[in-house]
Amino acid sequence: MKIEPLATLIDRRAAESPHASYLEDARSDRSLDYAEFADAVHAWRALLDDLEVPPAGGVLVDLADPLGFAVVHLAVVAAGRRSVPVDPGVPWADVMRLSGLLGGAALLVSDHAERGAAEFDLATEFDVATVEPESCRPAVVVHAMPGRTFATNSSFGEPAAPTSVEGSTLLFTSGSTGQPKGVELPESQLLFVAHAIARNNRLVPDDRGYNPLPLFHVNAEVVGLLATLVAGATLVLDRRFHRTGFWELLSTRRVTWLNAVPSMLAVLAHSGDILPSADLRFIRSASAPLPDAVREAFSAIPLVVSYGMTEGASQITATPLGEPVRPGSVGVPLGGEVQVRDESGQVLPPGEIGAFWIRGSGIIRQYFLGRTPERFDLDGWLVTGDLGYVDDDGYVFLVGRSDDVINRGGEKVYPAEVEDILLKDARVREAVVVARPDPILGHVPVAYVIPPAAGLREDEVDDLVHALRDRCENELPRFKRPVDIRMIADLPRAATGKVQRSRVRVLAAADARPGAAA
């Protein structure tokens, strides 16, 4: 199937369904139909041309407003430039650092420039030609950066020609297990994955998705914005997840599918009754397997459990819609290939744990500016850093990251195996197992457990810890049992809600020091 360019797709949607709603703000009556959205995209393209932003020139998109972000981000890509999304919560110094890392962006688009003005004299960094395009809601401030060139790069090997008209987005991995890496995703790659998602989720124009995930991450951009555009459907955008009034909001907005992550669903599962409306036809959960207790809590609603990464433009595997979710599985490969290899690079048979390698049209072939080439082989395969196995039916099961495996005196402990045991207790909302340094064994597993949102009394905490220790003793071999189980209100997280295990390991190392609080 030939995939049309993003600009062509936007114009076709506006011609076919001009008054159909594309984007809606969950917390107000603001919205954009397909004709209004196309007009906004054309206006932004004209502005980029007027400001002489070169082909493949970088545009830092620093917008907290979800409708404003969606318009500017997709307009930049459709106009053949690079959209570089910025977390609106980071300090201004980080925005400037990102610009320097990129070799200098051609443009900054921001709806909170006052943050920068308080810390920096913008005029020293930007040619402050303030523009307030009516096409973006709310009005934003645009700053052209003088005398900067943006390094060209293609994720498919050779540097892109300066005259290339294919737009892209440049993202940075969360860094949850190491140093963030730049990932450039051309629009053809983004749209390839968006089409695969729309097919798997059987999206149609009558669908109304709800997305509370951050738009500066690849999931919301592809699973939310682009897959919805491909289907000619509607997407309700929220700035963040709110537990209070959640089901009422989905009912009022007539939401037919939800874009979520496991931590969000875990909060809902432990917050009382799950009250979906008749309109809700499925929930999509991204990034990791669903704990059994959470999966069972949502058993009355069709689930699509998926696994992806920025390098794969958001989705690599997913449960086929309508198929039952297999406990611990993240579905089957969609639009690409998955191999499980041992340490020597040999492909392993079904059921054996090894390293995941991925390849396909949705997978990058190098990092931004060619960094970390050792993660790719000559046949276009990328090692993900994830560990797991594939069963006889092709379903993929994750057991953890290679960096997360705990070597306890020569015995390997996969955190997911231990976490699954802890999560069997209905009082556990979330559990994370990491390595703690040990002077004799090298490392030992320790567990951090988040209790229900309502909290527990001190005696209830003691009861839960004892119950979890008994469960581990009964269901795990000795070397896999956590040496310590600690209750904690929350854990370090990335903006998507994913736990940053590298920071939890730092916490565990601190807890191991003499004199650390028990």
Image (cartoon, rainbow, N blue to C red):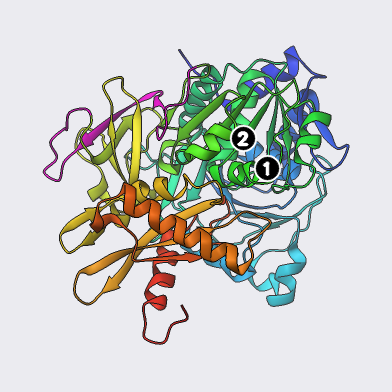
Which residue is pictured at 73% across the width and 68% down the height?
A: 115
Instruction: Pick the residue in front: 256 or 470.
Output: 470
Q: Residue at x 41, y 45 (%)?
A: 420
**Does 273 sit left or right of 517 as displayed?**
right
Q: Quadrant of residue 48?
A: top right
Label 1: which secondary element:
loop
Query: Mark 1 sits on what residue?
Result: 212
Would residue 103 be seen by someone viewing this image from the given angle? no
* 47 and 213: which is toward the camera: 213
**Which mark is drawn over residue 259?**
2
Q: Residue at x 11, y 43 (%)?
A: 344
Disc with the residue nearer the chain's start (2 vs 1)? 1
Locate residue 475, reporting x and y percent: 32, 47
3D distance between C-alphas at marks 2 and 1: 7 Å
Give the amino acid type for the residue marked by disc 2 in the picture. Answer: Asn
Q: Is residue 506 left or right of residue 150?
A: left
Task: Give neighbour class at mark 1: few <14, some 14-19, many 20+ (Cα, 10 Å).
Answer: many
Residue type, mark 1 in image: Pro
* Highlighted range, magenta: 323-350
Q: Residue furthest right?
A: 29
Q: Is residue 332 above or below residue 462?
A: above
Q: Give the quadrant of the N terminus.
A: top left
Considering every residue shown, the one lying at the far bottom of the view is 515
- Number of disc labels: 2
Q: Residue at x 72, y 29 (%)?
A: 276
Bin the neighbour count of mark 2 within 10 Å (Cα to Cα): few under 14, some 14-19, many 20 and up.
some
